[in-house]
Image (cartoon, rainbow, N blue to C red):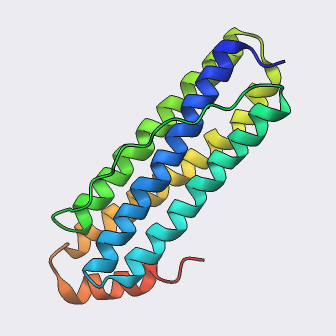
Amino acid sequence: MLNKKIEKALNDQLNMELQSAYIYQSMAAYFEGINFKGFAKWMEVQAGEEQEHAKKIYDYIFAKGGKVTLEGIDAPKTAWKNAEEVFKESLGHEQAVTKSIEKIYALARKENDYATEIFLQWFITEQVEEEDNATSILEKIKLLGANNSTSMYLLDKELGARA
């Protein structure tokens, strides 16, 4: 049976992952609207990954005999100054997700919930990758210049190759 404190924390994380998917979908729409189809595809894939993360938590809550509680999702931001601003926000968001998961991990440890600790290890590893991806793209944008159309065109093509 899932500890009620952990159940609440996991439900909060589940909802955060769904919010993340919504944020990334909005970022994809922004890029689609300015004809950066590669950036849009990258964000679409990211949105899908966030939905998968939410589903993992959803399934885990049920597997442990808990109850899933879905909450309302806030409308995401829809406009940015440029790609650099989008990826700064993406990185900041991923850092907030990392902190949230780490808090749940600490709670599971405190409550001696070893199964949840093990379950969350996958998410901790995933967050290292998420932050690294956002940082890498942000650094490329800074290096190339967010307003350099040739460089951004090439980066758009690169990001569009994400599967």
Looking at the image, residue 45 lies above or below residue 132: below
Q: Position of residue 151 (x, y in %)?
A: 26, 84
Looking at the image, residue 79 lies above or below residue 150: above
Q: Quadrant of the N terminus?
A: top right
Tally of numbered discs: 0
Q: Quadrant of the C terminus?
A: bottom right
Question: Residue at left 68%, top 9%?
Answer: 110
Question: Residue at left 69%, top 39%?
Answer: 57
Q: As drawn, is 30 to the left or to the right of 104?
A: left
Looking at the image, residue 3 lies above or below residue 117: above
Question: Residue at left 29%, top 70%?
Answer: 30
| Residue situated in front as seen by the camera: 117 or 43 | 43
| Residue situated in front as seen by the camera: 30 or 111 | 30
Q: Quadrant of residue 8?
A: top right
Q: Position of residue 28 (x, y in %)?
A: 39, 69
Question: Residue at left 21%, top 62%?
Answer: 79
Q: Position of residue 97 (x, y in %)?
A: 48, 38
Q: As drawn, is 143 to the left or to the right of 105?
A: left
Q: Quadrant of residue 58?
A: top right
Q: As drawn, is 33 to the left or to the right of 19?
A: left
Q: Quadrant of residue 104?
A: top right
Q: Position of residue 160 (x, y in %)?
A: 47, 82
